[in-house]
Image (spheres, rainbow, N blue to C red):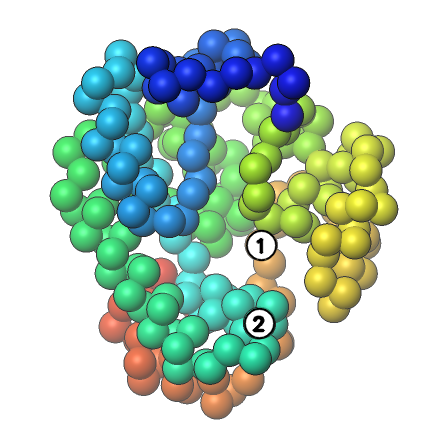
Amino acid sequence: MWKDFIVTDCVNIYEQLSIKTQKPIVINSTKDISWVEEQIAAFPKTSSQLYFIFLQRDGRAVINSRIGKYPQEDVKEVINTWKERINEIQELYRKFKGKKIKLHYENLATNTESVTRKLCDFLEIDYQPQMLQYYQHEHHPLGGNNGTQFLVAKAQNKNLQRLLFNIQECNRDYYQNRGLEINLDLRWRQQIDPNVEHLFEEMAGKENEEFKWNM
C-alpha cells in the first residue's frame, strides 16, 4: 500500500497503522480465530482500546456463498466448518472482557443509519452522514469482499476491469448493475438448493437460531 511504510516489532502494528493513516480507529476484519486471539492477547501491552464487533449473518447465506465459490467441496464439511467456527466465535465473544457488541448484517443493510448510529455510540465517536457513502472514501483493503471493492472502484472510476475480473463470473452482472448504496442481498434464497438448506437446518439449525433472518 505504502512504499515508505516500514513495520517495526517495537510498536503494535495497529498503532503503527493509526499513526501512518492519521486515523484513530483501525479495523481488523480477519476471520481467523487464532489470529484474533493473538491480537487480543497483545493489546494489554499497548495504549489502545480494543472493541469487539461480532457482525452476524444468516448461516444459510454464508454456506450458499461458500458452495457457489467452491462447488467441489463436500456440503457436510462446509456446514460443519461453519458450525465449528460459529461456536468458536461465540466462545471468544463470551470470554472477551472489553467492550463488545453483536450486529446483524441484515439489520445493518435494512436500517443502515440507525445501526450505524448505534455503532458510533458503541465506539464513542460522532455519527456523520457521509459514513454511509463508504464508496466516496479512500480504502486500503487487504483481502476482503471483491464485490464491495468493485463498487468502491466503480464510484471512483479506478481499476474497474481488474476488480471486475476478480468477481465470480456468475456475480458480475449483479455488481455491475446494482447501486452503490448499502442494501440487503438475499440472492441466496433463490440460489440455495432446497436439499442443502434442509441439511443445514438438520446439522446447524440450533447454531443458526441467533443468526436466522426470515423477513
Residue 136 showing in the rendered view: yes
Q: Is residue 93 above or below residue 22?
A: below
| Three-letter residue code for mark 2 | Tyr
Taking depth in this image into account, of 163 and 210 the one nearest to the observer is 163
Question: Which disc number belongs to residue 184?
Answer: 1
Taking depth in this image into account, of 67 and 136 the one nearest to the observer is 67
Residue 125 showing in the rendered view: no
Q: CA distance from mark 2 to mark 1?
A: 23 Å
Image side of residue 85 versus residue 72, left or right: left
Residue 190: x, y in percent? 62, 76
Residue that label 2 marks: 70
Residue 19: x, y in percent? 47, 10
> Within the image, what quadrant is residue 48 found in?
top left
Give the SS element for disc 1. Answer: loop
Numbered disc total? 2
Taking depth in this image into account, of 168 and 60 the one nearest to the observer is 168
